[in-house]
Amino acid sequence: PVSDLANGRQDFETGYIDLPAGAAVAVEHFFARKPTITVTPATVVPGGRVHVSATSFALGSKLNFSVTGQANFTVPVPAGVFAWDILVPATARPGTVTVQATAE
């Protein structure tokens, strides 16, 4: 939770739950998801490491990743997120690497 229960509402990262006045059951409200791929740092030297994170994908989906110079792979994302580190070989030549993800 990102907030304490106040006025019958509890906020979370993915939405909120509220209990309308007089209602017997709470109602879930989900925020719109905006899938995002983040790579940090944006620039790395040979021998360095980058952190890749995919966030805000649909809960329970599978993500198909493609990374320049690597074999494509698929992972299940029950929570809609996935992250990993990439070690850049010490012999890597300067260039641009593209990371893409599509959801099944």
Image: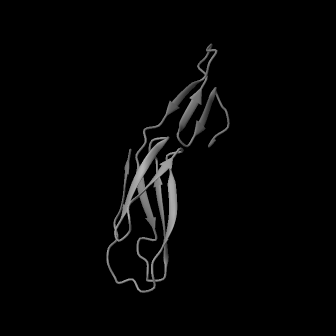
* Residue 74: % across, % down: 43, 54
In this view, the residue in front, 27 or 93, is 93
Scheme of image coloration: one colour
Q: Quarter of the image holding residue 61?
A: top left
- Number of dots carrying numbers: 0
In this view, the residue in front, 74 or 9, is 74
- In the picture provided, is 29 more to the left or to the right than 33? right
- Most distant residue in the left direction: 95
In this view, the residue in front, 77 or 18, is 77
- Name which residue lies at 51% across and 30% down: 29
* Residue 14: % across, % down: 52, 40
* Residue 66: % across, % down: 36, 61
Q: Is residue 72 above or below residue 31?
A: below
Q: In which quarter of the image is the N terminus?
A: top right
Q: Quarter of the image holding residue 32?
A: top left
Q: In which quarter of the image is the C terminus?
A: top left
Q: Is residue 31 above or below residue 70?
A: above
Q: Is residue 72 above or below residue 61?
A: below
- Name which residue lies at 44% across and 83% down: 46
- Most distant residue in the bottom direction: 91
- In the picture provided, is 38 more to the left or to the right than 27? left
* Residue 9: % across, % down: 61, 29
- Name which residue lies at 48% across and 83% down: 47
- In the picture provided, is 26 more to the left or to the right than 83? right
- Most distant residue in the top direction: 22
- Name which residue lies at 67% across and 37% down: 4
